């Protein structure tokens, strides 16, 4: 089974920088608990109003499961704004 690299970017109106880091500690901790998760590089662009990340998972199956969960999470966040 080969590892799977995943890149996700989405529209995000902030916060950015240190404030983003502080506000997303809980999210980071939950991502660390995802099955098959190995690491993530957080990405953000205040200029382009985007955030996201580059992830490494143990397998394509665990990456696909994360995409499904993350997509649902983003839909909920969009409804809350």
Image (cartoon, helix red, strand yellow):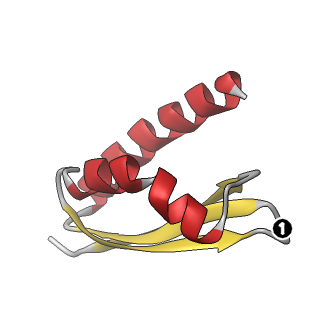
The location of residue 62, given as percent across then percent down, is 25, 53
Residue at 67% x, 54% y is: 10
Specify the farthest residue to the top. Answer: 79
The location of residue 49, given as percent across then percent down, is 80, 60
The location of residue 36, given as percent across then percent down, is 18, 59
Residue at 21% x, 75% y is: 2
Question: In the displayed structure, would residue 45 be above or below residue 64?
Answer: below
The location of residue 18, given as percent across then percent down, is 56, 70
Residue at 14% x, 70% y is: 1
Whether residue 49 sits left or right of residue 75 in the image: it is: right
Question: In the displayed structure, would residue 48 be above or below residue 11?
Answer: below
Question: In the displayed structure, would residue 78 be above or below residue 34?
Answer: above
Whether residue 47 sits left or right of residue 30 in the image: it is: right
Where residue 15 sits, quadrant-wise, is bottom right
* Residue identifier under label 1: 48
Q: Nearer the viewer, residue 68 or 43?
A: 43
Under tag 1, what secondary structure?
loop
Q: Nearer the viewer, residue 21 or 29?
A: 21
Specify the farthest residue to the right. Answer: 47
Check the picture and name the quadrant holding the C terminus. Answer: top right
Where residue 45 sits, quadrant-wise, is bottom right
Mark 1 packing: few (<14 Cα in 10 Å), some, or many (20+)? few
Where residue 6 sits, quadrant-wise, is bottom left
């Amino acid at each position: 089974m080969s590892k799977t690299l995943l890149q996700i970017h989405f529209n995000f109106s902030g916060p950015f920088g240190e404030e983003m880091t502080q506000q997303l500690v809980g999210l980071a901790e939950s991502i660390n608990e995802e099955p098959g998760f190995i690491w993530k590089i957080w990405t953000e662009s205040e200029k382009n109003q985007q955030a996201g990340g580059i992830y490494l998972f143990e397998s394509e199956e665990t990456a696909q499961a994360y995409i499904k969960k993350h997509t649902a999470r983003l839909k909920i966040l969009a409804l809350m704004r």
